[in-house]
Amino acid sequence: MKYSRFLNGSTRLLRRTKALPLLAVFAASCAVAQPLSDGERVFIGGNVFGAQAPEDSRAIQTFGDDLIRFAVAPGEQWARDNRKGSNAERAELFSHDKIRFGEETSVSFAVRIEEMDSSPGRKHALLFQLHGPNRTEMPGVEGFAPPPFDMRVRRGQIHFVVRSGALDRGEDGDRVIATVPLEYGSWSSYRFDVGLGDEASGYVDIWKDGVQIAAYEGPVGYDVGGGRHYWKFGIYQFGRRNTPSVVDFGQVSLNSRGYLLQHEKDIVSSK
C-alpha cells in the first residue's frame, strides 16, 4: 500500500465511520408525496439527477427534502427497456455528474428495503451502482456494459461487486468484496468511497452503519479513454417478479455536497 494511500485512507476512516442519522420514522407520514416522471430532473445536494421510470406515477416519489421511494410492480417497464425487448424492470435516478478513470468519488445514504422477491431462482436486483461508460461515448467499441461497482440483492443477501477492464484486455471477472444479510423493513446507512484506477491505484471502501465492511484495493472501472462513469440508484431488476419491489432511500449525498432534495419545477417556480 502506498504511503499517501494509507494516510488518505486513515483520514477517511476517522472522518466517515460515524453512522448516518437513520430515518426512524418514514417521512411520508408527515410529508406530501411528489412523483417524479420519466425524464424529469431532481437536485440532490446540488447534484442533478434524471429519472428513468415506468408510466406509473408511484414509481419514483419524493417525500420532504431527503427521502425517495422507488416502487416497481410486476410487468412494469421503462419505455426504452420495453422497446428493446428487455425483461428488465426499473425505477432509477442517474447522476449527470461524470467521473473519469483515475478520479475518486464517494456517496452516502440510508436505505430501507420494504419488499423485494429475492428467492432462489430470481435474478439479482441492483440498488446502487457506478455505471458507465456509455457505449455512445466509445464509438466502435463493444462491451464494458456491466457496472464497475454495484450493490445488489440476490438470494436473501446484499452483495457488493467490483469490475474492471481496459481496451487492450477487455473486461475482467466479477469480484465480490463484501456480503451482508438482507433485512426487510429496517433502515441501514452506507458509505462508498471509490477510486477508479488500475491494480496500483483502484480501491473501494465500504461502511455499513458506521462499521467498515470492505477495504478493497485493486482495479476498479474501465480504462477506455474518454469513457466516463456515473452513479445510479433505485431499483433495476432482471426477470419479472410476482410481487412488487419497494425500496426507500434517504439522505443521499454525493461527494459530500449535502442531501437537500429539490424538484427542478419547484426551483424554477420559486425564482
Image (cartoon, rainbow, N blue to C red):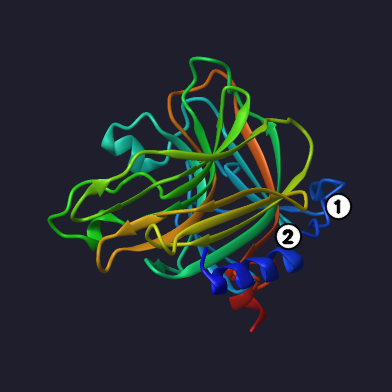
Residue at 65% of width from left, 39% of height from top? Answer: 247
Assign the C terminus to one quadrant of the image: bottom right
Relative side of 11 to 226, left or right: right
Asked if residue 13 shows in the view, the reply is yes
Q: What element carries label 1?
A: loop
> Percent position (x, y) of residue 223?
30, 61
Which residue appears at 52% of the width and 25% of the height? 74
The Cα atoms of the two marked residues, 1 and 2, are separated by 13 Å
Residue position for label 1? 30
Describe the element under mark 2 as helix, strand or loop: loop
| Residue 45 x/y as whole percent | 64, 71
Question: What crowding class fits label 1: few (fewer than 14 Cα within 10 Å), some (14-19), or many (20 or more)?
Answer: few
Q: Which of 111 and 31 is in front in this view?
A: 111
* Left or right: 234 as drawn, with respect to 94: right
Residue 223, label in figure: none
Who's the residue at 30% across and 56% down the image? 134
- Label 2: few (<14), some (14–19) or many (≥20) C-alpha neighbours in 10 Å: many
Q: Name the residue under label 2.
A: 66
Looking at this view, is 21 or 247 the one in front?
Answer: 21
Closer to the observer: label 1 or label 2?
2
Are the residues at dot 1 and dot 2 in contact (C-beta closer than 8 Å)?
no
Task: Give the residue displayed 68% in from the left and 67% down from the top.
Answer: 10
Q: Nearer the viewer, residue 194 or 56?
A: 194
Q: Which amino acid does label 1 sit on?
A: Cys
Name the residue nearer the viewer: 166 or 182: 166
Q: Is residue 244 above or below residue 140?
A: above
> In the rendered image of this protein, does residue 149 appear above or below residue 72?
below
Q: Which amino acid, by three-letter code, is at mark 2? A: Asp
